[in-house]
Image: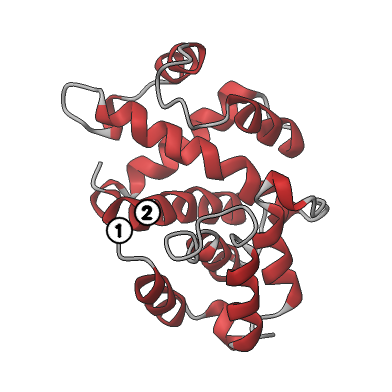
């Protein structure tokens, strides 16, 4: 076992070193929250899975182009001693890398990435700006509104649920519930 992969403190320090934007950090925490919840559900390594999610976009702010992200991040992680399974999961979260999603971790990260961002966006338009008010039906309704959070891929959200073999509504509810449990850190 690679100890750095299971050390949230080290992974959080890496995220904070490369990511200064509060919104991008909160996105990392939201994806981490959902992925950790699935790791518990699937009886997997919660720390490792959470840290993969925490670091999936850590290089994005400094290396935002498709020819750089997540490749630069992968190189940095290799240099720091992260294992290939950890790195491959991060590479697989971006559709354009063409890295296949074979493991349950890879599928889960992909399934949670866009959805966590979308749930956050839906939370922001609620009167309280809280995830407590977000319901599955409101997420589904907003998914149909192409102008709302237009950079979030609805296809990726749907494909993610299919990869996990979980009905879309159930997947959305699971992530909402997970995010409610961590709403303070997420600012929701």
| Residue 62 x/y as whole percent | 44, 66
Task: Please name the residue that numbered disc 2 is placed on.
Answer: 24
Q: Residue at x 23, y 47 (%)?
A: 187
Q: Residue at x 35, y 58 (%)?
A: 25
Q: Are marks 2 and 1 in contact (CB under 8 Å)?
A: yes
| Residue 11 x/y as whole percent | 46, 76
* Image label count: 2
Q: Secondary structure at mark 2?
A: helix
Q: Residue at x 30, y 33 (%)?
A: 131
CA gap, disc 2 to disc 1? 5 Å
Quarter of the N terminus within the rendering: bottom right
- 10 Å crowding of disc 1: few (<14), some (14-19), many (20+): few
Q: Secondary structure at mark 1?
A: loop
Which label belongs to residue 21?
A: 1
Q: Is 98 on the left-hand or right-hand side of 57? A: right
Q: Residue at x 73, y 65 (%)?
A: 88
Quarter of the C terminus within the rendering: top left
Asked if residue 44 is positioned above or below residue 119 in the image, the reply reads: below
Which label belongs to residue 114?
A: none
| Residue 180 x/y as whole percent | 34, 40
The image quadrant of residue 170 is: top right
């Amino acid at each position: 076992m690679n100890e750095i992969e299971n050390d949230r403190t080290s992974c959080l320090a890496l995220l904070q070193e490369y990511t200064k934007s509060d919104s991008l950090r909160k996105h990392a925490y939201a994806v981490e929250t959902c992925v950790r919840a699935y790791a518990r559900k699937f009886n997997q390594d919660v720390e490792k899975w959470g840290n993969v999610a925490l670091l999936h976009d850590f290089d994005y702010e400094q290396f935002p182009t498709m020819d750089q992200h997540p490749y630069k991040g992968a190189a940095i992680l290799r240099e720091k001693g992260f294992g290939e399974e950890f790195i491959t999961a991060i590479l697989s979260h971006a559709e354009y890398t063409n890295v296949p999603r074979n493991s349950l971790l890879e599928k889960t990260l992909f399934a949670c990435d866009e959805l966590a961002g979308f749930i956050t966006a839906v939370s922001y338009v609620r009167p309280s700006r809280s995830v407590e008010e977000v319901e599955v039906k409101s997420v589904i309704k907003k998914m149909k509104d192409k102008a709302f959070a237009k950079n979030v891929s609805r296809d990726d959200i749907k494909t993610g649920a299919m990869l996990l073999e979980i009905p879309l509504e159930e997947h959305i509810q699971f992530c909402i519930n997970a995010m409610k449990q961590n709403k303070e850190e997420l600012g929701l």
